[in-house]
Image: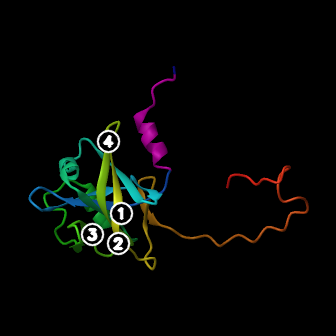
Amino acid sequence: MPAPLDIAALKKAFGNFATGITVVTTRDGAGNPVGITCNSFASVSLNPPLVLFSLAKTAFSLSAFLRADHFGVSVLSAGQEAISIRFATPSADKWAGVAWHAWDRGSPVIAGAVAGFECRKVAVHEGGDHRIFLGEIERMESRPDRRPLVYLRSRYGHFAASEPPEPAPAPAGPTTPAGGERGPC
C-alpha cells in the first residue's frame, strides 16, 4: 500500500499547473450577488457546451451555489489581480467598488473580463472535500483583445506567446506507419 501523500507537497505540485483565474458568481436567497475566486474551472464539452468548477465544502458561499439554478463565470483579464484577491478573501462586501452587470438569468459578470459565461446548473457531484458543479452555457461573451490573468506557483502573471516554430522539413521516408494508418492524434 502506498504511503499517504503529504498534503503540503501535493498542493505545491498542483501549483506547477498554470491556470487562468475566474470569479464564479450567483445570487443568494435574498437576490444579493455572491462570488468566489476559482482556478478550478474547466471546459468539459462543446456539444452541449458544458463547463465545471469545484468549490470547497467549507466555503461560506457553498449554500448559495447549491440553491441557485444558474451561475456566472468571469475569466479575469491581466490587471485584475486585485479583483481575484478580493473574491478569494472572506469579507463583508466583496462587491464594493467592483464594476459588474447582471446577465439574462441574473448572474453577476465582472466588467473588463476577457470572457464571461452564464450557465444553467445541470449537476453537482461529490469530489472529496469539494463539490463539483457542472453547468451548460446559455450565454457567453469573449474579448480576445484582452490578455488573460494567469496564476502559477502562487503568483499572478500573464501569458506571453512564443514565436511559432519553423516548419519541419518533409520526411524522406513513408509518412504513415506500416499498414497505412495514422496515429490517434
Q: Are marks 4 and 1 in contact (CB under 8 Å)?
A: no
Determine the residue positioned at 91% across, 63% down: 172
Determine the residue positioned at 35% across, 72% down: 113
Q: Is label 2 in a helix, a strand or a loop? A: loop
Give the label, 1 or 2, closer to the camera: 1
Give the label, 4 or 1, closer to the camera: 1
Q: Position of residue 166 (x, y in %)?
A: 75, 71
Q: Tell me the residue that label 4 is attached to.
A: 130
Q: Is label 1 in a helix, a strand or a loop? A: strand
Residue 147: name its quadrant. Answer: bottom left
Name the kind of residue labelled 4 in the image: His
Name the kind of residue labelled 1 in the image: Ile
Q: CA distance from mark 4 to mark 3?
A: 23 Å
Residue 109: numbered disc: 3
- Given residues 170 and 185, the one toward you in this image is 185
Q: Position of residue 12 (x, y in %)?
A: 45, 44
Q: Tell me the residue that label 2 is attached to.
A: 113
Q: Tell me the residue that label 1 is attached to.
A: 137
